[in-house]
Amino acid sequence: MTWLTWRQHRAEALAAGLFVAALGAILLTLGLPMHSSYHDGIAVCFNGAFIDPAMCSTNMARFQQDFGYTTAVLTMLNVVPFAIGAFLGAPLLARELETGTWQLAWTQAVPRMRWLAVKLTALATLTVALTAAAAALTTWYRQPLDVLNSRFAPAGFDVEGLAPPAYALFAFALATAAGTLMRRSLPALAAALAAFVVVRVTVETALRPRFQPPVTLTRNRFEVTNDWVLDSGFADPNGHHLSRAEFEAVSDAADAANTNLTTYLHDHGVQGWISYQPAERFWAFQRIEAGIFLALAAILLAMVVWRVKRRAL
């Protein structure tokens, strides 16, 4: 069965492997100059040693200018988990059903459940391994950026750590399930892509900010950190968060009194507030989100097994 699985899916496996190898070569080519620039000109600004503020400001501006394209590169890497997982998962059953070869494959000496178990295990393992390798390369590539920016940004959280392999396994299970139902590889890929995007966006926007209760602080000034800022505004002395209209009324009152807005806010006890997720929660959030997508993948694969076992497709 292992040899048969390799024979049937070697083209997809080799293509996915070459894709990750090419991605690794690109990240190394782009990442080595960025790492060198960071260590030569910026790292000293964060290691607690004596620093020259003007030098740090100049070097950081040059770094941002030279490597400002990194956000676009990292955003494009969001497609990697789906590309690997769905590419390997869509044809797993859809190809057999589309060509009719399932009638031969499932009447041989190997029981259909063993046939399915070997294929699912082999291709799911390959999916996770390739995506984990891509995530490891991306995590290395992002190291200088993780010091300068929040890792909770989509160009960070979604492409490094534990999340990408979980996304890929979910895409694999989703494409396999779609192929089982639709019996064609290309329509299964399209359906899986639509569902994948909907689930990813829903988790990112509706669930991720609430994985743990956010921290809310009220004060006059806030230090710029790598925390994930969810919301901010102003509050009156009683702690009431001012709406946009209420803050504009305060601003108009400051203008009417011919007073600087900052001074007026201070004199009337109005302070800024900020709601955020601390940077140290990054790995906890990674584990939670990976767990969500692994659970979804397990449900989808269980549905595939049930459908194959219950009746001839």
Image (spheres, helix red, strand yellow):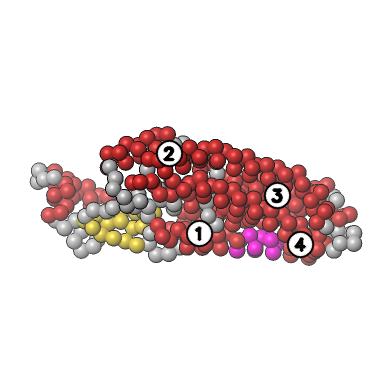
Q: Between marks 3 and 4, how big is the CA–CA gap?
A: 15 Å
Q: Between marks 2 and 1, how big is the CA–CA gap?
A: 29 Å
Closer to us: 60 or 197: 60
- Kindly identify the residue that appears in the image at 51 percent across and 50 percent down: 139
Mark 2: give few (<14), some (14-19) or many (20+) Cα within 10 Å. some
Closer to us: 127 or 210: 127
Q: Are marks 2 and 1 in contact (CB under 8 Å)?
A: no
Q: Secondary structure at mark 2?
A: helix
Q: Position of residue 294 (x, y in %)?
A: 60, 61
Specify the segment rendered in magenta. Answer: 295-304
The mark nearer the N terminus, 4 or 2, is 2
Q: Between marks 1 and 3, how big is the CA–CA gap?
A: 24 Å
Identify the image quadrant of the N terminus.
Answer: bottom right
The mark nearer the N terminus, 3 or 4, is 3
The magenta stretch spans residue 207 = no
Dominant secondary-structure state across the stretch colored magenta: helix
- Kindly identify the residue that appears in the image at 90 percent across and 59 percent down: 108
Amino acid type, label 2? Ser
The mark nearer the N terminus, 1 or 3, is 3
Q: Secondary structure at mark 3?
A: helix
To which residue does mark 3 refer? 88
Amino acid type, label 1? Gln
Q: Position of residue 185 (x, y in %)?
A: 73, 46
Mark 3: give few (<14), some (14-19) or many (20+) Cα within 10 Å. many
Residue 152 shows in the view: yes
- The disc at residue 37 is 2
